[in-house]
Image (cartoon, rainbow, N blue to C red):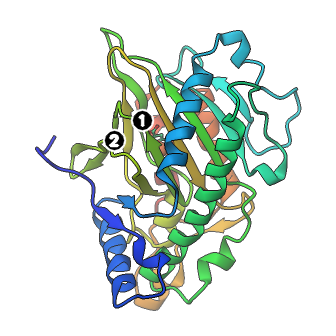
Amino acid sequence: MAAGADLPVVDLAPFFTEDDSGGVTRATEAVREACRTHGCFRAVNHGVPAELMARALELSAAFFALPDDEKARARPAEGTVAPLPVGYARQPAYSADKHEYVLVFDPKLRFNEYPAEPAGFREAVEECYAKFTELGLLVQEVLNECMGLPPGFLRDYNGDRGFDFMSAMRYFPATEEENNGLSAHEDGNCITFVIQDGVGGLEVLKDGEWVPAEPVDGSIIVNIGDVIQVLSNNKLKSPTHRVVRKQPVHRHSFAFFFNIHGDKWIEPLPEFTTKIGESPRYRGFVFNEYMQMRMRAKIHPPSRPEDVVHNNITHYAI
Ligand SMILES: O=C(O)CCC(=O)C(=O)O
Ligand SMILES: [Fe+2]
């Protein structure tokens, strides 16, 4: 790991003030550069109150500290209509991923199943969800500008918030034998936001080195997902990242996935192909097909390493 390396920091404050004087242009340029070089950045002054994020992490820690049978009650009856099972779940013992989580969709959709305890958890989750949605819409506008797309293109193309979801996670302490928390992967969606407690462990691959995304109170790690990578024909990249577990503590984090509707057709946009005389690097696909493929790989992890690579976006690479 490169000594002292950290993720690029982008101050989003200019997007929240009327009095600009070039700040918006500079912040947009900083996002463009970060998404080109790292595929991610640390956002500060992003509009999500630090107090809210700290409270959500603390309350999730209180929930995960409950006995297993109480946690298991935060699980809906069979036959969920949500795109993914909501509520509490734990990665199966055979999985290389070592965490448990509570998954929620947009509270307005009424799919969610919340734990009864601790008091205030549901409210904190719902407040965070609303704030992350606002931030997702803002970062999407910024990416639209970074990508040189017609004004409002991404907003119209990705106007349905029904597939966004958020996961509150607790990673188990590392053992003597191994410390994998979440295996190296790229996010399949559009934009991800991660907040974490003080334990740390999130790492981003940059030029073959794992760069730790150190915990910094109040900041949010913003990741570009595969959809943006494909639309931009690799101009913006979806970074490989992983979570390493520590000893002897649990680690808590939230990830918010600003997604796209499952029926959407995803392919490199003309701005990055025909209009500039470049060949598309991906064939088109329906987003749901990609999500299903990733889900199958998670539930039934491939036994041969050569199959693993085809469960990510390289499956569609030309
Ligand atoms: O827990 C984290 O820090 C990251 C989670 C993540 O990368 C994911 O859920 O895709
Ligand atoms: Fe991820």
- Above or below for 257 versus 177: below
Q: Amino acid at mark 2?
A: Pro
Q: Which mark is residue 183?
A: none
> How far from the left and from the top, in percent, is residue 232?
46, 73
Q: Residues within 10 Å of mark 1 (few under 14, many from 20)?
A: many
In space, the residues marked 2 and 1 are separated at their CA atoms by 7 Å
> How far from the left and from the top, in percent, is residue 65?
57, 17
Pointer 1 residue: 197
Of residues 280 and 12, the one nearer the viewer is: 12
Q: Amino acid at mark 1?
A: Asp
Q: Which mark is residue 215?
A: 2
Image-based side of 5 in relation to 106, left or right: left
State the residue at coordinates (44%, 68%).
281
Circle 2 — which element?
Answer: loop
> Is residue 91 visible to us here?
no
Q: Are marks 2 and 1 in contact (CB under 8 Å)?
A: yes
Earlier sequence position, callout 2 versus callout 1: 1
- Above or below for 94 versus 227: above
Of residues 239 and 286, the one nearer the viewer is: 239
